[in-house]
Image (cartoon, helix red, strand yellow):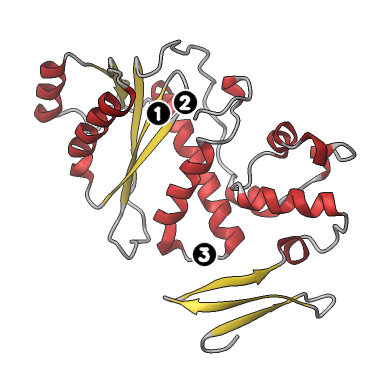
Amino acid sequence: MYLTFCLLQNILTKEIIGHGTKKWGLYHMDDFSSGKANHARHTSDKERQIWLLYNRLGHPSFRYLQHLFLALFSTLQPSSFKCETSIVAKSHRVPYPVSHTKRDMSFSLIHSDVWGPSHAITPSGNKWFVIFVDDCARMTWLYLLKRKDEVFGVFQSFHVMIQTQFSAKIKTLHTDNGGEYVNTRFQAYFQHHGLIHETSCSQTPQQNDIAERKNWHILETTRALRIGAHVPSRHWDDAVTTTVYLLNRMPSNVLQFRTPL
């Protein structure tokens, strides 16, 4: 490692596998062989391509990759691939029961939840984020927040965006009982626009399971991207927006392996 650039070397073979230039405290990789660096034992072209796509798409399930790239898995099984980064990043407690109800019309029900505060403050000062998830398509919109009280203004912008870009109307917003949602400003806005506000019971995140599960998925993938790319935690906002971009374009089991987008 030098003042303005670094070299990456395979510990076993001593081969130079990449180099990067230092910019704003991060080393931006100019030339990097992902297959050699992370999985030197895999030598076939198909395996190297699978690992490259796996890293670029945010560490999704190899079963999902098989649906996307059948030709690459013609002689390989998803179960033969193991990623230690994903195991570390996606470890969590026992999941909540799965909800089997789903609306058949987009924007008739929107789930929302706020995450934060982050222990690592980003260079732009973001400490929170709020998500809005369409119950029908599972399309997700994420907004970064510097303060938790910005949720009302963000929802107003989101509401107008849906009306303008999709020529659609939101009918119901489902949230927890957090003070950022349950207040006089939101109540007046709901009454003015004829929106229904559904809230879960206190201390019962299971009733807000769609948003909670989506938060889990986003945070798991974000950790996998950061750990895999060795990005400092203070850049979590860039990683989390990249994650949502990828998840909206990845097939979902809830949608019979179609993409939300």
Mark 3 or 2, which is nearer the eye?
2
What SS does tag 1 mark? strand
- Sort mark 2 into few (<14), some (14-19) or many (20+) by Cα contacts within 10 Å: many
Q: Position of residue 133 (x, y in %)?
A: 40, 28
Q: Where is residue 52 in the image (x, y as percent from the top left)?
A: 70, 54
Q: Residue 79: tell me if it is visible.
A: no
Q: Which residue is drawn at 42% across and 33% down?
A: 140
Q: Which of marks 3 and 2 is nearer the N terminus?
A: 2
- Are circles 1 and 2 on residues that touch, CB within 8 Å? yes
Residue 46's place in the image compared with 5, above or below, is above
182 vs 108, left or right, is left
Residue 201's place in the image compared with 12, above or below, is above
Q: Residue 85: tell me if it is visible.
A: yes
Q: How far apart are marks 3 and 2 (CA)?
A: 28 Å
What SS does tag 3 mark? loop
* Residue under numbered circle 3: 231
Farthest bottom residue? 3
What label does residue 138 carry, if any?
A: 2
Q: Locate residue 188: give its quadrant.
A: top left
Q: Distance between the residues labelled 3 and 1?
A: 27 Å
* Residue under numbered circle 1: 133
Q: Distance between the residues labelled 1 and 2?
A: 6 Å
Q: Which amino acid does label 3 sit on?
A: Val
Q: Which residue is drawn at 37% across and 40% down?
A: 142
Q: Where is residue 143 in the image (x, y as percent from the top left)?
A: 32, 43
Between residue 222 and residue 199, name the one nearer to us.
Answer: 222
Between residue 10 and residue 165, name the one nearer to us.
Answer: 165
- Sort mark 3 into few (<14), some (14-19) or many (20+) by Cα contacts within 10 Å: some
Between residue 100 and residue 202, name the one nearer to us.
Answer: 100
